[in-house]
Every structure is written in C-alpha cells, then in structure tokens.
Amino acid sequence: LQSNDAPTDGDINFLKGYIAGKQKLLEELSAHRAALSAAEKPLTTLRSTLATDITQYKKALHPIRRLPPEVLSEIFLQCIDENGTENEVSRFLDSTLSCLKSSLDPSQCPWTLSKVCSKWCAISLSFPHLW
C-alpha cells in the first residue's frame, strides 16, 4: 500500500480477502444502523409521552394548588383597588391575568380569574368584594 509497485499475486489475494471482510462488516453495521433507526422512533415517542406525563403530574404538585380559598381570595382582591381600577399588583400581573378595569367587562378580573379552573371560579364567584 505504501509503494507504487504492482501487487504480487499473494498481495492481490490478501487485499481482496481484506476488502471482502471489511465490506461484510460494513453491511452488518448498516443493517444494525437500520435496526437502531427503526427502534428509535418508538423510543422517541415513548420518551415524549413520559415527559408529558411527568409534566402533568408535576403540575398537580404546584404550591398554588395548596393555597386555601381565604388566601386566594385575598390575592384576587389585590388585583383591584377600592375604586375598581388596577392597582400596583394588578399592573404587575396584567400580562398573565388581565386584571380588572370594570367588573362588567368579561375580559377583565374577576372574570379572568374565574376562568382559570373550577376552584378559582367558585372562590371568585363567592367573594363579593371582587364584584
């Protein structure tokens, strides 16, 4: 291989055998690669499903779910001030809660709060100070 001399008959036989062995190995590796690629899709799907399940279960553990209704109603109340307009807290939360400018405007607090979940709906509807 390292000279420009023509290979001998023995070298030719050796090189042909060597090439055939390497080609066979390459074909086997290609077959293994195809099998791994075929197995990859279901594994990727399973991984995605597991990640989604974990995320859903983690949501159930979020601390806000453990706040008692009294605390949540006070938080809701902080979204509005005595005049029914936005206060400092509601301006802070405005990007996520779109808090109260008018209690009759369904796009504002407490309507928005009541749409988060059934627990928040019950709390906001039972808390007259929000309305």
Image (spheres, rainbow, N blue to C red):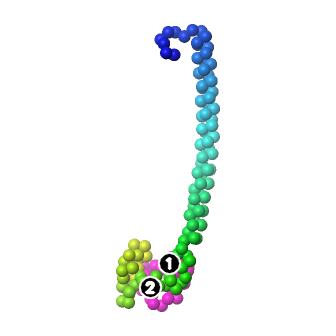
Nearer the observer: mark 2 or 1; the answer is: 2
Between 77 and 125, the residue placed more toward the observer is: 77
63 left or right of 92 in image? right
On the image, the x and y values in percent for residue 67 come to 54, 79
Residue under pointer 1? 115
Element carrying mark 2 = helix
Q: Is residue 122 magenta?
A: yes
Q: Residue at x 59, y 43 (%)?
A: 37
Residue under pointer 2? 77
Element carrying mark 1 = loop
Q: 69 above or below 48?
A: below
Q: 106 above or below 8?
A: below
For marks 2 and 1 on the same chain, the one whose residue lies earlier in the sequence: 2
Q: Residues within 10 Å of mark 1 (few under 14, many from 20)?
A: some
**Which residue type carries mark 2?**
Leu
Res. 17 in view: yes
On the image, the x and y values in percent for residue 24 come to 63, 27
**Which numbered disc covers residue 101?**
none
31 left or right of 107 in image? right
Magenta-drawn segment? 103-131
Q: Residue at x 62, y 19 (%)?
A: 17
Res. 110 in view: no
Between the residue at mark 2 and the residue at mark 1, the CA separation in whole angstroms equals 16 Å
**Which residue type carries mark 1?**
Lys
Q: 107 above or below 47?
A: below
Q: Residue at x 52, y 88 (%)?
A: 126
On the image, the x and y values in percent for residue 79 come to 41, 82
Q: Residues within 10 Å of mark 2 (few under 14, many from 20)?
A: many
